[in-house]
Image: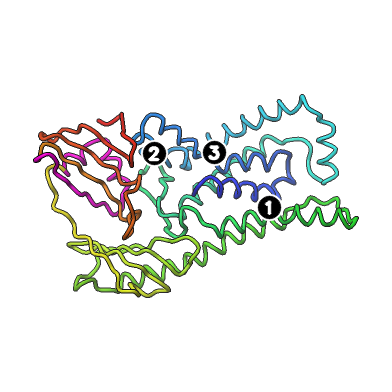
Amino acid sequence: MEPITHFLTGACLGRSGFNRKTALATLTMTLAAEASDLDMVGYFKGPTFGFAHHRGITHTFVGIPFVAAAVLLLVWIIERARRFGNQEKRESRLRRRGLPTEPRWGLLYLFALVAGLSHILLDFTNNYGVRPFEPFSYRWHAWDIVFIYEPLLYVALISGLALPALFALINEEVGARSRRPRGQIGAILALCGMVAVWGVRDFEHRKAVSALDSRVYRGADPIRVSAFPQPLNFLDWYGVAETQDFYAQVQVVNGEVDPRGDMQIRYKPEVTPAAIAAQKTYLGQVFMDWSRYPLLETEARDDSQRYVVQFIDLRFSPPGSTRSVLSPRVELDSNLKPIGAWWGARKDQTMR
């Protein structure tokens, strides 16, 4: 998932009751829920290196304890810096709200672990996938039920955080006061709303996959099928069915395959020497390890003095889509030696 959903999830976790156990719980869990994406710094070394290590060790059960420790160190630094401010006033405000005034660092580390695991779970729900068992297994796992961004989750999480504050303002206006910490019920309801979205999505996803698997595509039985989510509409899925000779890309609506009759067939291209050479490059190896429905298209240029091989994963190339940053290209010379690579419009200087 994108960072906003992770931050909001961490904040809701903190407000759901963890903040009643120790000071700084909400801050710690908000930061820890997104901290795994620090692996994005790998892109400074080049797009292929970044792609190879994104959702890597920081998104694993082995890595999360170290990520949580790093977050706790940052929170400790923030707390030390805040000590130079008006500490008494801050503690007085927390007491009025019925919240702890002192951090319990052991508990905060456990809470950071919980928030870090929420990051893995959220990323698992979409079709990009995670490798949670690395370094023991580098297999990708994906639930395929939630789009990379999900507006309904925004609504649930933001409402769970914002509405309690709004109700508190209304109570102040009418003179009502409460010494109880506010926001817990709203946060719990927001998290329950997230789980409800997953439940409905999972039910509809299973129905879409079953419908795809029971279909015959131009006289050919499918070898495997997948259904991928679209934002907002629970009933609308993008389906891919692989047969012996081609891929079928179809829309699935409420369990009905190809309701508009606009199925697109993409035949598996011939495996060319250029495609084989491109797969042996660093980019090719990284992409093929991640891709679930790979399709390699080879184009000869300058009277076969150059070849350009484009890597496509049909998960992210539905009919009508333009060239994606997730569809890189490798350029080879007439001797099939790699001379360049691009991710979208960005050239990879680390190509090898």
Could you tell me how far apart the alpha carbons at marks 2 and 1 are, in whole angstroms? 37 Å
Mark 3 vs 1: CB contact within 8 A = no
Quadrant hosting residue 225: bottom left
| Residue drawn at 32 percent across, 59 percent down | 320
Q: Secondary structure at mark 2?
A: loop
Q: Which residues are magenta?
A: 275-303
Quadrant hosting residue 243: bottom left
Q: Is residue 154 above or below residue 215?
A: above
Amino acid, disc 2 = Pro
Could you tell me how far apart the alpha carbons at marks 3 and 1 are, in whole angstroms? 20 Å
Amino acid, disc 3 = Ala
Amino acid, disc 1 = Leu
Q: Is residue 296 magenta-colored?
A: yes
The location of residue 64, given as percent across then percent down, is: 51, 39
Quadrant hosting residue 82: top right
Q: Which residue is mark 3?
A: 35
Q: Check the picture and name the quadrant holding the C terminus.
A: top left
Say which of 333 and 113 sits in front: 333
| Residue drawn at 66 percent across, 27 percent down | 77
Q: Earlier in the sequence, mark 3 or mark 2?
A: 3
Mark 3 vs 2: CB contact within 8 A = no
| Residue found at the very far top of the displayed protein | 84
Could you tell me how far apart the alpha carbons at marks 3 and 2 are, in whole angstroms? 19 Å
Mark 2 vs 1: CB contact within 8 A = no
The location of residue 159, given as percent across then percent down, is: 66, 57
Q: Is residue 346 left or right of residue 20?
A: left
| Residue found at the very far left of the displayed protein | 303
Q: Secondary structure at mark 1?
A: helix
**Residue neighbourhood size for the residue with mark 1, other residues' Cα within 10 Å, grouped as few (<14), some (14–19), many (≥20):** many
Q: Is residue 311 left or right of residue 1?
A: left
| Residue drawn at 33 percent across, 42 percent down | 344
Residue 135, disc: 2
